[in-house]
Image (cartoon, rainbow, N blue to C red):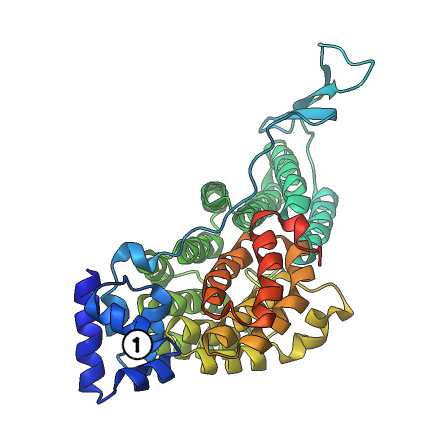
Amino acid sequence: MEKSFGAYLRQLRLAAGMSLNDLSAAARYDKGHLSRIESGSRPPTADLARACDAALDAGGALIARLPAATRRRPPAPTPPPATTEPAGDTWSLTLWPDGAGYMSARRYGHPAATDEPAVIGWPPMRQAGEPEATSIATVFSAVTDLGRRHSPALVLPQVITLLQTTRGLAAATRGTDQARLLHLAARLAEYAGWMSQETGDGRAARWWTRACSDLAREIGDDNLVAYTNVRRALLSLYDDDPLTTIAAAGSLRGRHGVTTRVRWLAAMREAQGHALAGDRDGCRRTLDEARTLHDRIGDDEPVRPLGTTSTLDVTAAVEGWCLHDLGHHAEAAGHLATALHSTTNQIAGAVPAERTPVRFAVRRVLALTAAGDVETGCALMAGLLPDVLRLDSATVRHDLGDLARMLTRWQHLEPVRALRPRLAAALTRPDAAAAG
């Protein structure tokens, strides 16, 4: 496959009338390295294929020549699990669908510790009404506000417990109050899936997304059922699986009972899938569709909107994201800078930065670095690291891994040498990267 890719690269380069020097300057890869790729003595990478595809205006044809395994990024390293039991109280929690449950608490490393755990239980929930549903919605809003600015590990236990409590209340309630509680439970399950994805646990994210879909079907919320396909598309995108991303997002076309906002979110996911596959035309077509849909979002939306509620221009930011995956790195960085303009002060530390702007800000760093503006990229990344560490996002680490690999091409530069140890710490031990 490497030889086939290299021969095709050479064919496209000659057809474009470019020398190796020309391609080296346009793609920002060493001439000798490109020569070894063309001869088949070195395997291509996804980054190189995207850069050369853009430089040769190949429209994704070169990206499509990559072996499937090469298109997938290596997973970012995750911290190893603890090998010893920590001192202090350890709780095991069991929650039943009717709201009943019990907690088994055991104390380790304490002089008064015994082998017998303390067991604390509580009965099933009683019938609830509008006041209880309103109170749960208020707690949910507070938890999601934490999730926008802090580690998913901080909010995920609260979301799961609140979800199970809500299910218990719904089991004891009837009528419209039950429907409202089940809808809250479905939204909590969807949010648990997102936070699970942010911890790096794709399997748990898919489990919670299925739970959301099942609860939404139970109450006949077709819009929320449809939105779970948007979530599945995003999970597939981070698995570097463009075909599944496109299929999941594209399945909402012509589907009844789907709001304009959900169609807008689906169009953006589909565009990202096309970009990952190297399909420039498909990406542009679905981005245009996303812009049109965004302009039509109106009063048919629920009180609590689905998907991101960030104040930045998400459609423009997604376009920048796509341009980077298509190999147009300088253009991508410009789009992302424009989209992030309204949140610059926030990301600079005026207030705790939110998850969505930071994710796109890191993607901007990646695009700048790929475009050869390494010093600016390193300076921005150094400023972003405190927010990156606090958010502790596996999806952000997805791009950090790409950045770390990319910087090996410029490891002779002082800004790169200064950043790389902190970047490596952020990828392996998030609490250690703040040092230095």
Q: Please name whichever residue, 85 or 35, is drawn nearer the observer in this view of the structure.
A: 35
- Residue drawn at (20%, 69%), measured in percent from left and top? 39
* Position of residue 271 in the picture relative to residue 395 (left or right): left
Spot occupied by residue 132 in the image (x, y as percentages of width and height): 73, 42
Q: Which residue is mark 1?
A: 53
- The residue sitting at 62% across, 32% down in the picture is 168
Occupied quadrant, residue 210: top left
- Taking the image as shown, residue 230 lies to the left or right of residue 170, namely left
Q: What residue type is disc 1 on? A: Asp
- Mark 1 surroundings: few (<14), some (14-19) or many (≥20) residues within 10 A: many
The percent position of residue 397, horizontal first and vertical second, equals 54, 56
* Quadrant (top left, top right, bottom left, bottom right) of the C terminus: bottom right
* Residue at screen point 41% across, 58% down: 237
Provide the secondary structure element on which disc 1 rests: helix
Q: Relative to the observer, which residue lies in front, 408 or 56?
A: 408
Residue 262 seen: no
State which quarter of the image contains the N terminus.
bottom left
Query: Residue most toward the right?
Result: 112
Image position, residue 254 (x, y; %)? 34, 65
Residue that sits furthest to the bottom in the current view: 17
In this rendering, position of residue 22 left or right of residue 39: right
Question: Toward which corner of the image does residue 141 lie, by quadrant?
Answer: bottom right
Please say whether residue 59 is visible from this viewpoint: yes
Q: Nearer the viewer, residue 384 or 356?
A: 384
**Viewer-side residue, 134 vs 72:** 72
Q: Residue at x 31, y 74 (%)?
A: 32
